[in-house]
Image: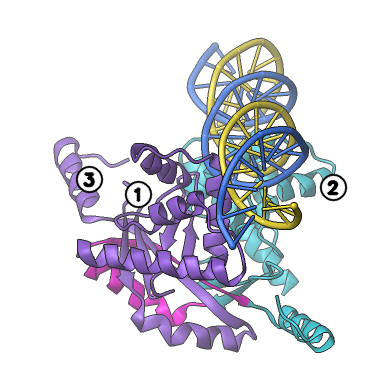
Chain colours: A cyan, B purple, C blue, D yellow
Amino acid sequence: MTAEAAAAGEQLFERFHRWLRDRHLPITRQRDLVSRAVFAGGEYRSVEGVQRRLREQGHRVGTATVYRALDLLLESGLVRAHDFGEGFKRFEPLLSPGRHGHLICARCGRVTEFSTERFERLLPLVADEHDFQHQAHQVEIRGLCRLCRDADAATLGRAGRST
Amino acid sequence: MTAEAAAAGEQLFERFHRWLRDRHLPITRQRDLVSRAVFAGGEYRSVEGVQRRLREQGHRVGTATVYRALDLLLESGLVRAHDFGEGFKRFEPLLSPGRHGHLICARCGRVTEFSTERFERLLPLVADEHDFQHQAHQVEIRGLCRLCRDADAATLGRAGRST
DNA sequence: TTAGGTGCAAACGGTTTGCAATCGA
DNA sequence: TCGATTGCAAACCGTTTGCACCTAA
């Protein structure tokens, strides 16, 4: 799984290189670093998270530069932005666009992916019915993850009261 | 339709009153005004939009108070917050929670509702499969609305070039 | 050589907070 | 009366921008 994730990240990195080259945009040290940080699996990183990771690796990239590199990544379609209600955005590497949705725990904020295979046919159809040309979609479910539910149950058992 | 919308708004307003009373929270002039402004049909208002509407009606409510009233409305479950990528949030009156999704035009930002009836059974199931307790969900489709598509086509016809 | 990128610091804009005055129940 | 709310202004914080300097091609 880790090897797979690394390979996927590497593939995205190369696709980004190609995308830059195709439009004669300079390939800079900073763009390499930021894209690698975003493509490195494990989590959807925030701007601050990208900078933290790079700092840990001994690299220094200015905040504005991170934002500008992310703009390019978004434009290339290799990355998608999310607002999970934390007050900042997180960026998701997009191996295959729009193949999954997100389960978001209302209590702890943990985000889990789920397959949206069952919806992939339906959503473009819905767009069509409303005279929209479908480009992308996003499916989110909010609820309580197992851990938070268990924690709640424990609290209830002890105090006999919810709030 | 307008009469219906007004009736719906009135019902939400009364539900909010009851919700406040039930938890012994003061019913203030400001809470009445803000909730009515949000519940008034037609559009999903932003904080600034709420204030503008109230100002037009000759009322003055502080910004912080609008935010605090909206927090209560969200907590009551009668209102849902959206981030359509405009840099601020919009607030949607929730007559019946989670019965529709949103089509968002990638070009002009127009938001259209669509029925999510076809998904209502499926999504709680998906949550269950991932050990989540389903609370709510949100389905969004991004694409081009009819008008923007036509405008694009016209431009292409004239200039013969896309960007 | 040079168009474009970078980093800094200041500006921005939506949202939150501290606090004295005020209000609903 | 009294705890909660309000409004103002300042603080916050993620993001954007202006500009002098640097760098990929």
Q: Is residue A124 magenta?
A: yes
Q: CA distance from mark 2 to mark 1?
A: 39 Å
Q: Chain of mark 1?
A: B
Bin the neighbour count of mark 1 within 10 Å (Cα to Cα): few under 14, some 14-19, many 20 and up: some
Quarter of the picture containing the C terminus of chain B is top left
Percent x, y for residue A154? 81, 85
Q: Which mark is residue A56?
A: 2
The reply, left or right, for residue B148 in relation to residue C1 is: left
Q: Where A38 falls versus C20 (above or below)? A: below
Q: Earlier in the sequence, mark 3 or mark 1?
A: 1
Which image quadrant for residue A67? top right
Residue where numbered disc 3 is placed: B152
Amino acid identity at mark 3: Asp
Residue where numbered disc 1 is placed: B109
Amino acid identity at mark 2: Glu
Q: Where B158 falls versus A16 (above or below)? A: above
Q: Chain of mark 2?
A: A
